[in-house]
C-alpha cells in the first residue's frame, strides 16, 4: 500500500493560512511556522505527521497528500478542523 509522509500547519481562518503560506514562500521555515502558529499538537514537532496510508486522514487531506507535488506547500485545504497548509515530504 502507498504510504506518504507529510507535515502541516492548522489554523482557524483561510486568511491566516494564506498569510503563512506567503511567509513560507518568502523564506520562513515551515517547521518554525508550525511550532509558532499551528493549532494541532503536531505543531510541536514542526507539523510532522509521520507516515500514513490512504484513508487514515480526512478526505480533503488525502486528496492533496496522495496526488500533490512533493516538497511544495499546498493549501489552504479546508477540513472540519480548520485550514491546513500541507507539505508532502515523501510518497511511495
Image: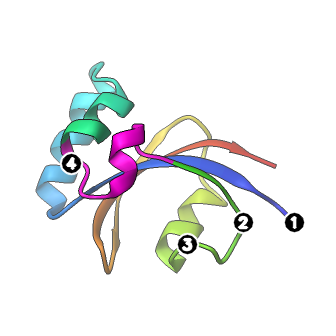
SS of the residue under disc 2:
loop
Numbered badge on residue 18: 4
Q: Is residue 51 left or right of residue 39?
A: right
The location of residue 92, given as percent across then percent down, is 82, 49
Q: Are marks 4 and 3 in contact (CB under 8 Å)?
A: no
What whole-number distance in Å separates the C-alpha atoms at marks 2 and 3?
A: 8 Å
What whole-number distance in Å separates the C-alpha atoms at marks 3 and 1?
A: 15 Å
Q: Are marks 2 and 4 in contact (CB under 8 Å)?
A: no
Q: Residue beneath label 3, please?
A: 57
Which residue is at 60% across, 44% downward? 69
Numbered badge on residue 53: 2
What whole-number distance in Å separates the C-alpha atoms at marks 2 and 4?
A: 27 Å
79 vs 21: above or below: below
In magenta, the rendered stretch is: 37-48
Q: Residue beneath label 1, please?
A: 1
What whole-number distance in Å separates the C-alpha atoms at marks 4 and 1?
A: 33 Å
Q: Are marks 1 and 2 in contact (CB under 8 Å)?
A: yes
Tell me the crowding category of disc 2: few under 14, some 14 to 19, or many 20 or more residues within 10 angstroms, Cα based: some
Give 65 or 40, whichever is nearer the viewer: 40
Nearest to N terminus: mark 4 or mark 1: 1
The location of residue 24, given as percent across then percent down, is 30, 30
Amino acid at each position: 500500500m502507498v504510504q506518504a509522509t507529510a507535515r502541516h500547519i492548522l489554523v482557524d481562518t483561510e486568511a491566516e493560512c494564506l498569510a503563512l503560506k506567503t511567509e513560507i514562500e518568502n523564506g520562513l521555515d515551515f517547521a518554525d511556522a508550525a511550532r509558532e502558529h499551528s493549532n494541532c499538537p503536531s505543531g510541536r514537532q514542526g507539523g510532522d505527521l509521520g507516515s500514513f496510508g490512504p484513508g487514515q486522514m480526512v478526505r480533503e487531506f488525502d486528496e492533496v497528500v496522495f496526488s500533490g507535488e512533493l516538497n511544495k506547500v499546498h493549501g489552504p485545504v479546508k477540513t472540519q478542523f480548520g485550514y491546513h497548509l500541507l507539505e508532502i515530504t515523501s510518497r511511495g
